[in-house]
Image (cartoon, rainbow, N blue to C red):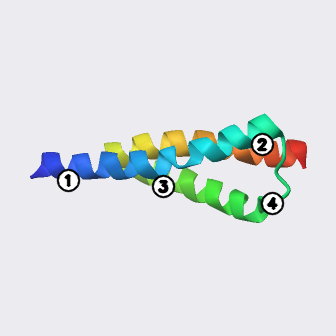
Amino acid sequence: MEKYITFIGLFSGFCTTIAFVPQAYKVWKTKRTKDISLSMFLIFTIGVASWLVYGVLTNNLPIIFANIITLFLAFLILVAKIKFN
């Protein structure tokens, strides 16, 4: 049963993480971020970083893997928002 729970966690993390790829790609390609809320992305990035810390502290691999990648993508969008705005 534990194997299935881990799989569901990994699959869920994959889906929620991969959802950021099109947005990150579009931002870097167009260099336009005027419709992205800076405060929302700051709060979101802090939240993702906090989830990553939680995952590390609880040794939860699905949370660690998903949030490392999500944090990277969110950080790219956040940097673009600051740089291109």
Residue 48 visible in rendering: yes
In the rendered structure, which disc, 1 or 3, sits on the residue that comes first in sequence? Answer: 1
Q: Nearer the viewer, residue 73 or 31?
A: 31
Residue 63, given in percent of the width and then of the height, sits at: 39, 49
Q: Residue under circle 1?
A: 5
Disc 1 to disc 3, how far (Cα)? 18 Å
Residue 43, given in percent of the width and then of the height, sits at: 67, 62
Q: Secondary structure at mark 1?
A: helix
Q: Secondary structure at mark 2?
A: helix
Residue extending farthest to the right is 85
In the rendered structure, which disc, 1 or 2, sits on the residue that comes first in sequence? Answer: 1
Disc 4 to disc 1, how far (Cα)? 37 Å
Q: Secondary structure at mark 4?
A: loop
Residue 31, given in percent of the width and then of the height, sits at: 84, 40
Binning the other alpha carbons within 10 Å of mark 2 as few (below 14), some (14 to 19) or many (20 upward) gives some
Say what amino acid the circle numbered 2 marks.
Val
Foreground tag (4 vs 3): 4
Disc 1 to disc 2, how far (Cα)? 34 Å
Residue extending farthest to the top is 29
Q: Nearer the viewer, residue 19 or 42?
A: 19
Q: Residue under circle 3?
A: 51
Say what amino acid the circle numbered 4 marks.
Asp
In the rendered image, the vertical position of residue 31 relative to residue 52, given as above or below: above
Q: Looking at the image, do the residues carrying marks 3 and 2 touch, with CB atoms under 8 Å apart?
A: no
58 sits left or right of 85 in the view? left
Residue 23, given in percent of the width and then of the height, sits at: 65, 47
Foreground tag (4 vs 2): 4
Say what amino acid the circle numbered 1 marks.
Ile
